[in-house]
Image: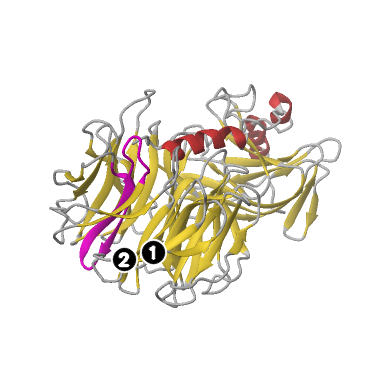
Amino acid sequence: MRVKLPLHFAALVSACYLASCGASSEPHSGSGLPLRPGAENPGTQLARLLPAPAELDQLAGSGRSVSADNIQDGSAFFSAHPGVEVQGTQLRLEGGAGYEWAVYSFDPGVSALLQVEVSQAVSAGSAYLAVPDYEAGRWVLTGPHSGSVGSNLAYPGARNGAGVTYCAVIAPAGAINTIQTVNFITDAGGGTFPITVDAQDGTGWDPHAAIVQGRPAIAYADYGTSEGADGDLTYVIADDAQGSSWGEPLVVDSNGDTGHSPSMLIVDGNPAIAYHKFDEEILMYVRAADATGSSWGSPVIVDQSNSVGGYPHMELVAGRPAIIHLMWPLGDNPELMYVRADDSTGAAWPAGESLATFAVTEEVSDTWSMEVVNGNPAVAFSDSSSGPLFFRRASNAEGGAWNDAVQVSTGTIQWNDLHVDAGGNPCISFYDAFTGVLKYARASDANGSAWGSAVVVDDRSNTGWFSDLVLFNGLPVIGYYSLLNGNLGFAMADDANGSAWSDLRTLDEAGNTGGIPTLLPLGDGSTLGVAYFDVDNQDLRWIGDIS
């Protein structure tokens, strides 16, 4: 089999360059952290437009009021360029032929700083965000940004000796942006902001999340910092229901090059993971020894027949774990395989069966997904050489026999995710590589025997990679990656049928990030979380409290 994260790794690496997000890791002089590579570098001139952090401290010492409000209106700035325009509670910055800026202050008291979020509308050009680094005596600059943005404040040097911090927004030449609110987030109060769950370089690949004992947990591959290093299957669980903080990552399987493309769910009360062991080209399964995943049993070989286990997807089928995966013997056409365990815990597995044969001669992506549809297992898949999207449902609850495949959509379809909507009908999110947009299709009946026309969810070019579909308050919701700009995208349907989509958001735009997202309803179902891979920093990230 010729798959070692073939499309996940290659796609994200190429995306890093195509989205102009992958170049130097060296900081630009005077700007602290590197700007998004590929963007115009304003260099030291832009950073020097701002008062130095020490100058702001002098203003505060001379009587200028420092805010204790974590959420501040755009008009409530600490200091600003004389050309800014207050518009009610908002502040308009217009760079014109020069620049304009505004600085906001915050005293968090005894609370720990986590993040700052700036809600802004950028109507022309791009804006830049800066936060202080008192240890280095300079500003840390990020950008350019085309909309609302957040920045980490959980680092040494973010606060001065009195415990105060600042953030600044800059509109350079040609830019126009209106600052609506500035939200300083602490451990005493939050917002929707990214958290780095595992910061070790080379970790966080292919994250898959599940609720474990009421808390989000993530299975992922850790490749370490060495080029060509073997992967480890890794597991981490949050300390609370929203994922505000996380425990220490636990290596579940480090035997050789393993842990690729994990798929996790609760099996007989304990978390369990299906994954690909690349060096032996076999399909693996492991189940925790307890309900929280603090210890794990021995890994089980599910299938070692002939180059198997690529991109597994696991679901519970009639009370037992079942897995679809890729089999690709050298010189033969790849096949989509289905296998269901002999018991409820996945201790033993029979031989699998083929559901589809792909007519391809080069690498294929994980263009398949599985869900239980009206009581029977079903799969969505596409042949990445010719492209159409197909749906196939078993004729019994165990998946022992299968109906013929039904074509859902034409095109060149990649990265689909199959789900069942609030009305009980199967639905699929997918990326149409022919048109370069994110789409959504819904069946006309509960068995998926007929499908309506697919609708466009996000029509921006090269947007919709790695789509992940869930239900939230009865509405379809999709997390996805944008090759256009490397951002983490989020879309919520206007209705339960997914016939229109107007709620489109960017959850993380801090460089080339948002890779391979996995959405998860949290707690009582009133919020969502998303785990994803930060391509630039090669680490695992999480955003909770999405509503």
Picture quadrant of residue 51: top right
Q: Which mark, by number, is residue 203? A: none
Give whichever of 512, 53 is nearer the camera: 512
Residue at left 49%, top 67%? 476
Amino acid tagged 1 = Arg
Point out the tag, 1 or 2, that comes first from the N-terminus: 1
Side of 449 where 263 appears, left or right: left
The residue that disc 1 covers is: 392
Q: Tell me which corner region of the image, top left, top right, bottom left or bottom right, holds residue 528.
A: bottom left
**Colour option used:** secondary structure
Q: CA distance from mark 1 to mark 2?
A: 7 Å
Q: Is residue 127 magenta?
A: no
Q: Which residue is mark 2?
A: 402
Q: Is residue 221 above or below residue 134?
A: below
Range shown magenta = 308-334
Q: Residues within 10 Å of mark 1 (few under 14, many from 20)?
A: many
Per the image, label 1 sits on a secondary structure element best described as strand
- The reply to whether callout 1 and callout 2 are in contact (CB within 8 Å) is yes
Count of marks overlaid on the render: 2
Q: Is residue 521 left or right of residue 341?
A: right
Q: Is residue 313 visible?
A: yes
- Is residue 333 located in the magenta-colored stretch of the structure? yes
What residue is shown at x 33% (from left), y 39% (from top)? 221
Question: In screen coordinates, is 192 left or right of 125?
Answer: left
- The x, y position of residue 164, in whole percent, is 55, 41
Q: Where residue 210 sits: x, y (%)?
A: 33, 56
Q: Please, what is the three-letter code of the amino acid marked with disc 2?
A: Trp
Label 2 residue SS = loop
Q: Quadrant of the N terminus?
A: top left
Q: Is residue 428 above or below residue 144?
A: below
